[in-house]
Image (cartoon, rainbow, N blue to C red):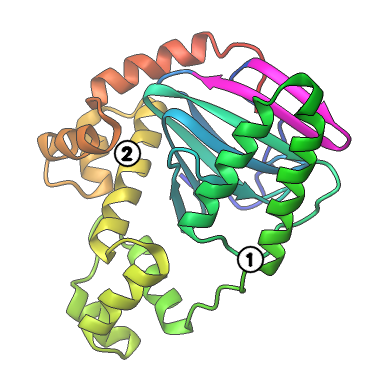
Amino acid sequence: MPSTIGEPVPCVTGHGAVLDELRVDGIGMRLVHYAAGLTIHHHTHDLAKLTILLSGGATERAGENLVEHESFAVVARNRFRIHENQYHARGARSLIVELEDVPALPGELSVEAARHHGRRLVSAFRAERSARARCVRDAVGDLIAAFHEAPPVSTPAWLEHARAQLFAQLAGPPRLEDLARTVGVHHVHLAQAFRRRWNTTPLGYVRAHRVFRAVDLIARGVPLVEVAADVGFADQSHMTRTIGRARRASPGTLRRAMHAAASDPGPSGS
């Protein structure tokens, strides 16, 4: 659920259990374990952060943007960006990199570049003690340069409008043909442009956001039958199947994991 207008958004230090950490100049690195089913509602951080998923599963939402964390691919987050996190049925283990002197990370890396730099950061964190600081400085410096060199992403206004329409009507989204007519393009062109920009289909975008919204409501204690109706699933069975495919667990299993995670969040991580 979005925050109420005027409601303060907490700026937090972190979440999860820290397993190992390293500090080099203005760079902080932490290996963090996140409990299965952990859900973190709207919040921000006061430092730019990089996250590299090592195992498990995690999904992050910032407004209309939804990111499924992929193994060893860097996910960048600028300081004070409001976002939410959900961790899947097996929890997650991630390398978190905090950048004190980097107010913003412009540009957008390709999937290949994100994985390349993610693996370099992990290798630097695991390097021999004598080489660790140098490896970390080099890996972080090259990554920041890559963000600055990446071409800015330009999304046509009509495509942004199409996505906004889907996001606003998740429970009953318009047909592709009707959406295309609304934004003034052919439905085939819309589908192709949508996939090129966000690496998913319009239907896949709706499905992913429905799962995220459903898991958020489950975490807040809403009865499952009400969650299914509110989010737009045909029935509770449909929701169970969809969430099971996306999160590798049933809604009931996730709810039990959420309760366990909430009762024992562990030391503060990131």
Residue type at mark 1 is Gly
Could you tell whether 168 is left or right of 73 in the image?
left
Which part of the image, by quadrant, shows the N terminus? top left
Placement of 181 over or under 39, stated as above or below: below
Q: Answer whether residue 12 is visible to the viewer in this image.
A: yes
Of circles 1 and 2, the one toward us is: 1
Label 1, label 2: how far apart the Cα atoms are: 31 Å
Q: Which residue is mark 1?
A: 107
Q: Secondary structure at mark 2?
A: helix
Q: Which portion, as a residue range, is magenta?
A: 19-34
The residue drawn where x is 43% and y is 42% is 70
Placement of 207 over or under 237, stated as above or below: below
Placement of 184 over or under 206, stated as above or below: below
The residue drawn where x is 27% and y is 27% is 223
Is residue 155 covered in magenta? Answer: no
Could you tell whether 123 is left or right of 36 in the image?
right
Rendered location of residue 105, percent (x, y): 70, 57
In the image, 107 versus 131, the foreground residue is: 131
Residue 136 falls in image quadrant: top right
In the image, 194 versus 259, the foreground residue is: 194
Q: Secondary structure at mark 1?
A: loop
In the image, 225 versus 216, the foreground residue is: 216
Residues tagged 1 and 2 counted as in contact (Cβ below 8 A):
no
N-terminal of the two: label 1 or label 2? Answer: 1
Rendered location of residue 123, percent (x, y): 62, 32
Q: Answer whether residue 37 is visible to the viewer in this image.
A: no
Q: Which mark is residue 214?
A: 2
